[in-house]
Image: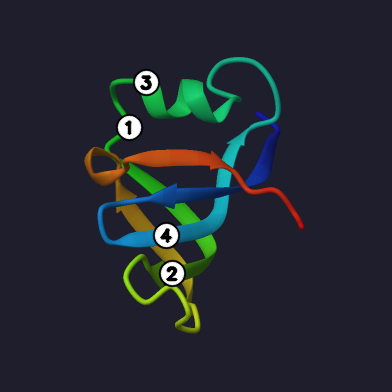
Amino acid sequence: MELRHERIVVETSRYRITGDLTLPREGYRSRLSEYLNHGDVAFLALTDVEIVPLEGMGAAPERRPFVAVAVRHVEVAYPHEQG
């Protein structure tokens, strides 16, 4: 199966987390919405991660090579747009 990395942003009640999610290049669960809505996914495995607290948005992001985010804590998720 060919894979691709999609840069996404997820928000929990306390953090905005930006990182790369590995998805299939095409087909089943290749879109973020399909991946999140699939019942057997408990965690989002993100790489090259930036974490910013929602309170104190002026703070420098904390960087981590890997973070697992529990899907049950995700309030908002969307593809990251390069700006």
Q: Are marks 4 and 3 in contact (CB under 8 Å)?
A: no
Tell me the residue that label 1 is attached to: 41
Type of the residue with mark 3: His
Of badges 2 and 3, the one in the foreground is 2
Tell me residue 31's x, y (percent). Answer: 59, 25
Q: Secondary structure at mark 1?
A: loop
Tell me the residue at 43%/73% (across/down): 57
**Category of crowding for the residue at label 1, using alpha-carbon neighbours closer than 10 angstroms: few (below 14), some (14–19), many (at least 20):** few
Tell me the residue at 40%/40% (across/down): 76
Tell me residue 61's x, y (percent). Answer: 49, 78
**Category of crowding for the residue at label 4, using alpha-carbon neighbours closer than 10 angstroms: few (below 14), some (14–19), many (at least 20):** many
In the picture provided, is 21 more to the left or to the right than 2? left
Residue 71: assigned label = none
Q: Are marks 4 and 2 in contact (CB under 8 Å)?
A: yes
Tell me the residue that label 4 is attached to: 16
Of badges 4 and 3, the one in the foreground is 4
Q: Secondary structure at mark 3?
A: loop
Tell me the residue that label 3 is attached to: 38
**Category of crowding for the residue at label 3, using alpha-carbon neighbours closer than 10 angstroms: few (below 14), some (14–19), many (at least 20):** few
Type of the residue with mark 2: Ile
